[in-house]
Image (tube, helix red, strand yellow):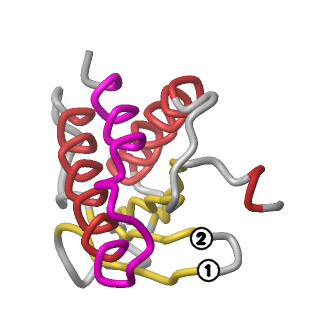
Amino acid sequence: MSHAETPALSFGDLVGGTGQDARKWGDAVMQLARRVKSERAGVDSPLRVNVVYQVPGEVVQVKFSGVRTGRYSATERLLLIQAARPVGAVPPNAEDILLDLLDAAIGQANLFAQKKGLTDNPLEEIRAVASRLKS
């Protein structure tokens, strides 16, 4: 996939088990990812962001909370941000929790972009996509 084909914002998940809670969190992430796919159409950004939600389970535990910077591809101008979701059952406000993590991930990506001199723009295009998801 070329730089031009890489979406400005994308999602993924890493589900650490097969239990009911882990599967439900994974489903919630994928539902939000489908919404992002429709909202990001035509959006360009100087830094592309891939947010990977990490869901702990009985096989793999997540050893951090919040968000952290993952790998960066200079060729694709693509930054992976890892987001650890809370442990436990899926609450009624699961999407709100995922959106809060998305906001934190965009903030982390913005800090990375500024530190590396990739853009002076605070990733406004990606923030606008996230804002539309809250409507």
Q: Which mark, by number, is residue 38?
A: none
* Residue 77 image label: 2
**Tag 1 and tag 2, C-beta contact below 8 Å:** yes
On the rendered image, what quadrant is the N terminus found in? bottom right
Q: Residue furthest top?
A: 135
Query: Is residue 118 part of the magenta span, yes or no?
Result: yes
Where residue 73 is drawn, which disc sits there?
A: 1
Kindly indicate the quadrant of the structure image that contains residue 124.
top left
- Which residues, given as a range, are shown in magenta? 113-133
SS for dot 2: loop
Report whether 103 appears left or right of 74.
Answer: left
Q: Amino acid at mark 1?
A: Ser
Query: How many badges with numbers are in the image?
Result: 2
Q: Percent position (x, y) of residue 8?
A: 55, 48
The residue at the point 51 percent across, 25 percent down is 39
Q: Is residue 106 left or right of residue 70?
A: left
In this orientation, which residue lies closer to the viewer: 98 or 21? 98
State the residue in front, 22 or 129: 129
- Across and down, in percent, residue 3 comes to 74, 61
Q: Is residue 46 above or below residue 73?
A: above
Q: Which of these two is toward me, 79 or 115?
A: 115
